[in-house]
């Protein structure tokens, strides 16, 4: 079932409300939830098998995945972080201690000399999500385009990372919106119900 909502304005309204709920969480609640989310992600067999896991460096009130990144590296997995370029997201390896550059949108990202990779497992930030596995990002479509590119070879594993307060009943979606393979919140792993 594809929801037909022209929906840039609808998505913008839903995004704003979900981000307000996320921003409204106390620092203590966000920290505790981030630790729980890390535990759940680390227990996922598909993540454990991945040689390279793409994560993100948190901004604003996003789930803090930095301890999760450290744990992935500690068990021998390489971590990639997205770099925003005019052509879309480029995933670059980021080792412990590598300096990150200031990127667009207030992001911290690897520099252009870091090796580019095509990760097969991605931890995807988001503004809002529904139980069908659809997400609202930050409005630029970077992850949708990156996932389409990665999926052209073989479907990549895309796990949304969010606080449960970011859940909404239905995300308006279109033909180019790629559903997530799961969403991890502090309440557990959500297996998408499909369309």
Image: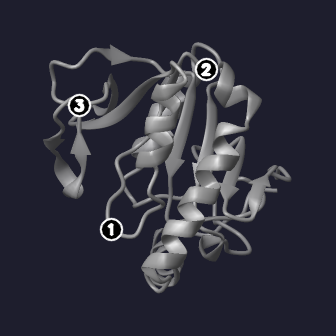
Q: Is residue 149 above or below residue 188?
A: above
Q: Residue at x 71, y 53 (%)?
A: 133
Which scheme is used to colour this image of the protein?
Answer: one colour
Q: Answer with mark 2 or mark 1, whichever residue precedes in sequence.
A: 2
Q: Residue 45, percent across and down? A: 75, 28
Q: Residue 136, percent across and down? A: 53, 61
* In front of the other: 158 or 96: 96
Q: Residues within 10 Å of mark 3 (few under 14, many from 20)?
A: few
| Tag shown at residue 73 | none
Q: Residue 69, percent across and down? A: 45, 38
Quadrant in the picture for residue 120: top right
Looking at the rendered structure, the secondary structure element under dot 1 is loop
Residue sitting at the far right: 193
Q: Is residue 115 above or below residue 95?
A: above
Q: Is residue 177 above or below residue 14?
A: above
Residue linked to disc 2: 50
Residue linked to disc 1: 60
Looking at the rendered structure, the secondary structure element under dot 3 is loop
Q: Residues within 10 Å of mark 2 (few under 14, many from 20)?
A: some
Instruction: Mark 2 vs mark 3: give the one in front.
Output: 3
Q: Residue at x 71, y 70 (%)?
A: 170
Residue linked to disc 3: 97
Quadrant in the picture for residue 181: top right
Looking at the rendered structure, the secondary structure element under dot 2 is loop
């Amino acid at each position: 079932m594809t929801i037909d909502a022209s929906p840039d304005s609808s998505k913008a309204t839903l995004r704003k409300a979900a981000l307000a709920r996320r921003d409204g969480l106390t620092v203590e609640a966000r920290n505790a939830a981030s630790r729980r989310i890390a535990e759940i992600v680390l227990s996922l067999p598909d993540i454990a098998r991945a040689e390279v896991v793409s994560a993100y460096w948190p901004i604003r009130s996003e789930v803090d995945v930095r301890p999760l990144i450290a744990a992935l590296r500690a068990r021998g997995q390489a971590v990639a972080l997205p770099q925003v370029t005019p052509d879309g997201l480029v995933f670059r390896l980021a080792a412990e201690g590598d300096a990150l550059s200031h990127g667009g949108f207030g992001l911290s990202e690897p520099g252009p000399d870091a090796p580019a990779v095509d990760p097969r497992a991605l931890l995807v930030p988001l503004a809002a999500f529904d139980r069908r596995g659809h997400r609202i990002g930050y409005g630029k479509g970077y992850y949708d385009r990156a996932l389409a590119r990665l999926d052209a070879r073989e479907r990549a594993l895309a796990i949304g990372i969010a606080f449960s307060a970011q859940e909404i009943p239905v995300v308006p979606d279109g033909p180019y919106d790629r559903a997530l393979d799961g969403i991890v919140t502090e309440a557990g792993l959500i297996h998408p119900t499909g369309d």
